[in-house]
Amino acid sequence: MRIIIFTNGIMDDPRAEAARWIQPGDLVIAADGGTRQALAAGVTPAHVIGDLDSLAPELRACLEAAGTIFHPHPPAKDETDLELALLWAAEQPARTIVILGAWGGRPDQALANLLLLALPALVGHEVLLAGAGWVIRCLHGGETLTLQGRSGDVVSLLPLGGDAVSVTTAGLAFPLRGETLRFGPARGVSNAMEGEVATVTLERGLLWCFCKKL
């Protein structure tokens, strides 16, 4: 089982994203306003998590009648709705979490959504933030990430919160061999896959991996 989280960003074609990412047996949940994106994709979320300030009472009543379980939180809280949804998902048996609808709208929220990939609670999970052809993951120190695609697919590696120490790649056009990507410079932007499989290994730190299929 995987967990699919719909968020309240901009999705140009919710049904197409759902068709691409949702598989039989997946558990679909929504972070508050992401409920509307799930419904636009033709999916009724099994769980809705957040302060619920984006949902009309009538919609909530209809969803409750359909069996949706609500996990309400107070509006005055330290976490965003997506963060609450991720923390809930991290406690479930699923090891893979896919986030949809996290792009667009406010740039501060979009950046915050990317930062959430580094939550300590998500270590040991495969977490993908997907949309508009992009897939973003966060690699933690001591991990190796295997990428699957085709020759020419864009791969960008950006350190998060400090230097990414001893980065080693295989299958990329511009290889890294135990090198450190410094926090700030954009050296890791716009690499590319040479074939169908590539790997990225990180010894210490945090590393965003952005992938765009051509």
Image (cartoon, rainbow, N blue to C red):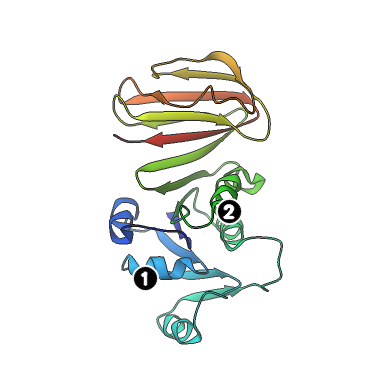
Is disc 1 in contact with disc 2, using a CB cutoff of under 8 Å?
A: no
Which residue corresponds to mark 2? Answer: 90
* Residue 43 visible in rendering: no
Which dot, 1 or 2, sits closer to the camera?
A: 1
Residue found at the far front of this picture = 106
- In screen coordinates, is 11 left or right of 182? left
Which is more toward the observer, 106 or 58? 106
Q: Quick check: 178 above or below 202? A: above
Q: Position of residue 78 (x, y in %)?
A: 71, 61
Where does the C terminus fall, quadrant-wise? top left
Q: What residue type is labelled 1?
A: Leu
For label 1, the SS is helix
For label 2, the SS is helix
Which residue corresponds to mark 1? Answer: 39
Q: Where is residue 14 in the image (x, y as percent from the top left)?
A: 33, 60
* Residue 136 visible in rendering: yes
Quadrant of the image occupied by residue 170: top left
Where does the N terminus fall, quadrant-wise? bottom left
Q: Crowding at label 1, few (<14), some or many (≥20) Cα neighbours within 10 Å?
A: some
Residue found at the far top of this picture = 177
Distance between mark 1 and mark 2 Cα atoms:
23 Å
Q: Quick check: 99 above or below 73? A: above
Residue at figure coordinates x 43%, y 61% from the top left: 27
Which is more toward the observer, 10 or 209? 10
Q: Where is residue 161 in the image (x, y as percent from the top left)?
A: 67, 35
Q: Crowding at label 2, few (<14), some or many (≥20) Cα neighbours within 10 Å?
A: many
- In screen coordinates, is 198 left or right of 143? left
